[in-house]
Image: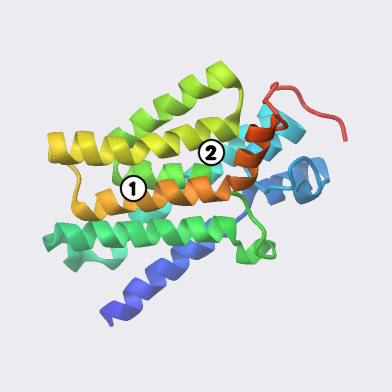
Amino acid sequence: MDKVVYFIGLATAYLLGSISSAVWIARTRHGINIREHGSGNAGATNILRVLGPKAALPVFAFDFLKGLIAVQFIRFTALDYMVNPELYTGYEIALGICAVIGHIFPVFASFKGGKGVATVAGVLVAISPYPMLMALAVFLVTFLITRYVSLSSIMAALMFPIFVIFLFGMTLKMASITLQCFSIIASTMIIITHRKNIKRLRNGTENKISFKKTKN
């Protein structure tokens, strides 16, 4: 019975992640298929680029909350994990990963979603808030200097495992081995999903964010 409950939790996290707010808001409020505009990505950054900040803010907030809420499913599906911190953290991470996979490959949107940065951020705030807030500071500083969301996301992703492992893991003893391993996996996942952006950054063709709605 426990295994069935755990599986239901993971499946529910995936379905929650599959709700593509970018596709839904662009279609219902603006009458467009966001995957046919801008970078073609169904995420907050492309919404910001194509439709402006008023449309991007609710998309980012919803995608962030998907990750945050998915981790909370553990309170209903894995109470016996409370006695084992590593197993508890491991199941939290599994729930978060399912939500992120749902965002990137949403069953409700033909398996064509976003890159998962906002959803990953929600997951990490739920599991490890302090390192994530520090990574967010890196994101904001990089963005204010460069105006590249992609570069800011990559820099934050690179710094997150450093904060988890070397500051909170080794120095403050506040990060489990499971969380330290996941921090590396999450960082790698974000960087891999930005491989096209990395190529454009190297070629000097990556678009900066101007906070102005583009015309299509």
Q: Is residue 44 visible?
A: no
Residue shown at the point (29%, 53%) measured from the top left: 181
The N terminus - image quarter: bottom left
- The residue beneath circle 2 is 61
Q: Which residue, given by chain and number where applicable, does mark 1 sit on? A: 183
- Mark 1, Cα crowd under 10 Å, few <14 / some 14-19 / many 20+, is many
Q: Is residue 106 visible?
A: yes
Q: Is residue 49 left or right of residue 167?
A: right
Tell me the kind of residue under disc 1.
Ser
Indicate left or right for 60 with 22 as reference. left
Q: What whole-number distance in Å separates the C-alpha atoms at marks 1 and 2?
A: 22 Å
Mark toward the viewer: 1 or 2: 1
Amino acid type at circle 2 is Ala
Answer left or right for 108 relative to 167: right
Q: Earlier in the sequence, mark 1 or mark 2?
A: 2
**How far from the left and from the top, in percent, is residue 9?**
38, 67
Q: Eyeballing the image, is 182 above or below 175?
A: below
